Image (tube, coloured by chain):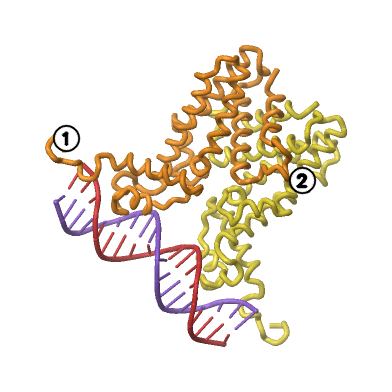
Chain colours: A orange, B yellow, C purple, D red
Amino acid sequence: MTATHGERAYHHGDLRRAIVATAMAMLQEGGDWQFTLREVARRAGVSHAAPYKHFPDKAALLGEVALTGFDQLRLALAATHAAASDGLGAEFAAMMRAYLAFGEANPALYRLMFGGAVANAADIHRDARAVGTFDLLVDLLGRGQAAGLFRERPVRGQAAACWAQLHGLTMLRLDGLLVAEKVGENAVDAALATLGEGLFA
Amino acid sequence: MTATHGERAYHHGDLRRAIVATAMAMLQEGGDWQFTLREVARRAGVSHAAPYKHFPDKAALLGEVALTGFDQLRLALAATHAAASDGLGAEFAAMMRAYLAFGEANPALYRLMFGGAVANAADIHRDARAVGTFDLLVDLLGRGQAAGLFRERPVRGQAAACWAQLHGLTMLRLDGLLVAEKVGENAVDAALATLGEGLFA
DNA sequence: ACCTGAACACCGTTCAAGT
DNA sequence: ACCTGAACACCGTTCAAGT
């Protein structure tokens, strides 16, 4: 009411952002990424038709949420870079841990990001916000090779190996397939050790 | 009509199997695993309520289909074992290739198997039909270690590393994230090479 | 024993109409 | 410009009723 003169922008100013935020919140609560567009609208306090003024369809909202997830993942990985002062080996280990921690902390969001249900998955993943995540790996491996820490191999291939290992571990764990009884204790650590033996010079 | 005396077992004998087969066929056609229970019934030539006489709900059918997929995957991997006569190295390479080929040939089915939409994913993946797939890897790595081909490490940890790498590569490729422009040519081969450098003695 | 048809509560999406 | 309410075509699921 202190704004220009009583105008309240109809609803609350930025419904688009509110919808994305609501969807993100719902992903955290239920472990399921299968939220419903109508419930998002309900929780945002608008009619079920309102979201269509901001997104062409549900898949588009899923895509926007996925990109927000990539933003968070990229920032989480970049933070380990900023905090690393014990050398490249420690920085590498911290990045691996940060990736796995993100998947464990955001299971539904992670599934959504890679689940193929988003609109034009190919386009989403070509987006700079998603590609940037991969580039952090490429950069780190490149610096590691220059320092003699990693074997000299095509760096994007090494990055693909790291990414696939991290992604595979994350997904298998979300599916409950890395339980100790089947795969042994500390399967994740063992798998990362094997990856390391292939990377370190 | 040559059967006992004109009785045709009402529909066609084994609706349960027909439903699973129809669902599998639909997975192959559309690249999408989001088939609808009503359409499965339609294509099987029964009412939309009929499947409920054989499955408690849709998730149960998804689970049955997923297990059928694990049967196929396990058989595909076991076939490489039977055909291998050029030593363990070749057998290992053949198994890696067979796994990746399965994912590429059955994208929707593969997504369903690991997508978390099935009923009680944890139970499904504890099923012998699914665990057997992993055991093939464990067995091969065990024989390889005994022969001095692979480094001596806890074999289930090595198997987890292989599985995660294969699973990650399969999923990332299904998502279109391993395109050459971003990750370099032959990213899959490069990633497998890095895995090999961590495994081979 | 196995299947059908109508019914219920829900979706995603569209569109004329409201402010 | 932004949102609502009713409407349409679809789902998953249930249940009395048919053969």
Q: According to the image, label 1 marks what residue?
A: A3
Image-based side of B197 in relation to A33, left or right? right
Callout 1: SS: loop
Q: Are marks 1 and 2 in contact (CB under 8 Å)?
A: no
Q: Nearer the viewer, residue B197 or A38?
A: A38
Give the quarter of the image for residue C16. bottom left
Q: Amino acid at mark 2?
A: Asp
Q: Residue at x 58, y 15 (%)?
A: A143
Give the mark toward the camera: 1 or 2. Answer: 1
Image-based side of A122 in relation to A93, left or right? left
Mark 1–mark 2 distance (CA, rounded to whole Å)? 66 Å
Callout 2: SS: helix
Q: Residue at x 60, y 63 (%)?
A: B22
Give the quarter of the image for residue A63. top left
Q: According to the image, label 2 marks what residue?
A: B135
Packing grade of label 2 (10 A; few <14, some 14-19, many >=20) is: some
Badges 1 and 2, same chain: no
Q: Nearer the viewer, residue A76 or B189?
A: A76
- x, y (%) of residue A4? 14, 34
Q: Residue at x 62, y 12 (%)?
A: A147
Q: Nearer the viewer, residue B18 or A9?
A: A9
Q: Is residue B72 visible?
A: no
Q: What mark, if any, has residue B39 been given in the picture?
A: none
